[in-house]
Amino acid sequence: MYLVKNLSIMKILSFVSSLDLACGGPSRSVPMLVKGLAELGVDITLMTIRSKDMNTHALEGTTAKLKVLEPSFSKKDIAKYLADEKFELIQIQSMWDLPYHKVMVEARRLGIPYVVTPRGMLEPWSLSQKKWKKILAWWLYQRKDVQKSACIFTTAKMEAEHVSELAITTCKAVIPNGIETNAYPCKTSIDVVKKQVLFLSRIHVKKGIEILFDAWKRIHSDFSDWQLLVVGNGEAEYVHSLEMNVESLGLKNSIKILPPVFGEAKIKLYQESALFCLPSFSESFGMVIAEAMSCGTPVVTTTNCPWKTLNETKTGWCIGLSVDNLEHTLREALNMSPTVLYDMGQRASKLIYDNFGYRSVTRKTLHLYEWLLNGGEKPEFVLK
């Protein structure tokens, strides 16, 4: 257990630009971390930018405070707020977008240490997207923002290594996202499981959905009683292109593209699915993987995601991303007996419970804050 000194004076700000649930993992993992820190006695505020579908209930039931900025906020606005509140430490929950840059600039001016959480934004695949724009931003301001931070907060060792490859010498902490396992209960009966493979995530080219479709095209005639569900939110034009792809492949009867679901409906989908598949080009963590596993569903994902433990623990498959590899793995999984898949899912749920519970992750985060503010022995999860 990690013990923290001086909790009564620890005042923290966590900044994430959006709390829209449709925006993906950070809209869930960041409030969970903030709530956990509040439970441990930290005076913490979650700051975000107002949006149409903002989750205004994210911090209900805790002492954590919510600060909502207007989209038009200026550097002067943020400077006054930071100066008035006298935060001891700020955690920046992503990067590239100018609002994050504004906060980091003012934090440096006021002498407030800050931690940068890249959230996958420094992964090789992400850096290859809009490459020249990012190169320009990197040398104009982003490299300085990252290098001047007190620490880089990564969610996997693989992400920390990728940050180091960019010649960033700031220390890196490796702390996974936590999951509230009670909110994602494990299925308790094999009878609820259907012959369906679930993709549930943000619908984006990064997620490898077209590769999944091509692999499904190769196997669907051999597994005609199985369905592939693609569930999530994405830009209308891209979602439409996927729908056209399904039609052109002749897969309308076996692939369903559905809008995002939340709460009990989401848990029901996880629990009813025999297999979860996220064939992503890049993930710094992959919250949906942890959620699916917590619900007792084995997972297929790629070596672009930090989940090689799936192979070691026989809770799923972590494979190189290609149509051939995905076809082979799906055939292997779908040929397994329902009991074998169910047992894999039960092991997956235990793995999440034992290693990714949000209370353990919260205490590690608190230990990091205490070390950054007060010094002492370097935590074992901090890499130099």
Image (cartoon, rainbow, N blue to C red):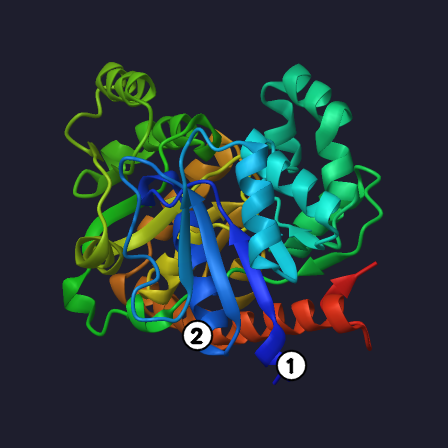
Give the number of the disc on residue 51. Answer: none
Three-letter code, disc 2? Tyr
- Which part of the image, by quadrant, shows the N terminus? bottom right
Report how far apart the C-alphas of labels 1 and 2 lie in the structure.
23 Å
Q: Is residue 362 left or right of residue 371?
A: left
Q: Secondary structure at mark 2?
A: helix
Pinpoint residue 310: horizontal percent, then vertical percent. 51, 59
Residue 276 appears left or right of 307? left
Residue 26: x %, y % from top left? 45, 49
At x 62%, y 51%, the residue is: 83
The vertical placement of 103 against 128, above or below, is below
Using a 10 Å C-alpha cutoff, classify the residue at mark 2 as few (fewer than 14 neighbours), some (14 to 19) or many (20 or more). many
Quadrant in which the C terminus is drawn: bottom right
State the residue position of label 2: 353
Q: Nearer the viewer, residue 237 or 171?
A: 171
**Is residue 270 at least partly visible in the picture?**
yes
Question: In the picture, residue 259 is in which quadrant?
Answer: top left
Residue for badge 1: 4
